Amino acid sequence: MNRITLYRFMNTAAKTISLAFAFYCFLLPAASQVKLAILSPDKNKQSEAVLAELKKSLSDNASILDQFLVESIFGYENFERPYNLSVDDSRKLGIRIGSNFLILIKTNTFRRSSFEKSEYYESFAAFYLVSSRTGKLVFWKFSKFEKDSPVESKTALLNSLVKTAGEILNNIRKTNKAELEADSLSTLILPDSKSRSAKEFRPPLPYRRLQPKYTDIASLYDILATIDVAVEFDSKGKVTKTEILRWAGFGLEESVIRTIKQMQWRAAERNGVPLSIRVLLRYNFKNIKTDE
């Protein structure tokens, strides 16, 4: 076999192997290649049990990262509100841990009472699935179970985790696909407030301000949170795109976006000329009843 023939043979073989490998990767379930970091910042006995059961349900379809490593890196960050992170903080955390997705768990059991029952026990869990690639909260689920005893309610919660794991894996697959196709909003740097261009610039303003609703479920669990959202307006003041930059769950992101779209906006202007723009809006939520 001469050199030219040998070269052609090796080149063809390399291409065949490369195609075979690509086909093999294509056949692999998308979730099985995913590295997951799972943790519960509010550590208690129940959170440890929920975390262990969820890891067991996910381990056949994903690579679960070492718990000591995950908790050490997360603890080092010392987040003031670990369930209310910005997309930048989430993305940086995911990179430091080396995960594709983060799963945060908030769980506890409370004794409750109502008009129907003088006493019952509620076990709840909130699950936050966060993409390390974008830092976005891509899936949020809340589960609760009400029983006559704390043992019964906790058992019902643990038994539901197989279904929750399936939902998480399904959303991981959907997110992987969506992120490959997504085009994120372009970044626009607003002029410095002291600059000449700032004096000639007027941001978009609502004709009538509306306050996003503090959801019932957020009130019930006394959620303190800040929602940051990037909003893109066209030259007529119409909202064309929104992107959550700090998430919290409990329906607060949906409440903010719904309210922004309900408001009528005056278009941004520079030198009296309407323009398209992207701005950051921030909304703070707290339980007023609790504060009073």
Image (tube, rainbow, N blue to C red):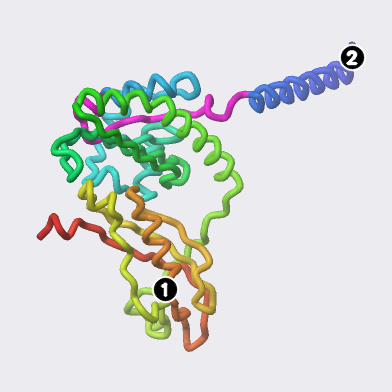
Residue furthest to the bottom:
272
Horizontal and vertical percent position of residue 22: 68, 26
Please give the range of residues in magenta.
Answer: 28-48
Q: Amino acid at mark 1?
A: Met
Q: Is 285 within the magenta?
A: no
Write down the quadrant of residue 59 in the picture.
Answer: top left
- The quarter of the image holding the N terminus is top right
Q: Residue furthest front?
A: 116
| Direction from residue 107 to residue 91 in the image, left or right | right
Q: Which three-letter amino acid code belongs to the residue tagged 2?
A: Asn
Left or right? Give the position of 54 relative to 61.
left
- Dot 1 or dot 2: first in sequence order is 2
For residue 233, side relative to residue 287 (left or right): right
Q: Residue at x 72, y 24 (%)?
A: 18
| For residue 277, above or below residue 12 | below
Q: Which residue is mark 1?
A: 263
Q: Secondary structure at mark 1?
A: loop
Work out which residue is located at the far top of the displayed protein and give it: 1
Q: Which mark is residue 210?
A: none
Q: Is residue 292 above or below residue 62?
A: below
User: How many residues crowd mark 2 within 10 Å: few (<14), some (14–19), many (20+)?
Assistant: few
Q: Nearer the viewer, mark 1 or mark 2?
A: 1
Q: Position of residue 117 (x, y in %)?
A: 18, 39
**43 part of magenta stretch:** yes
> In the image, what residue occupies the spot 89% across and 18% down?
5
Picture quadrant of residue 75: top left
Q: CA distance from mark 1 to mark 2?
A: 76 Å
Read off the residue under disc 2: 2
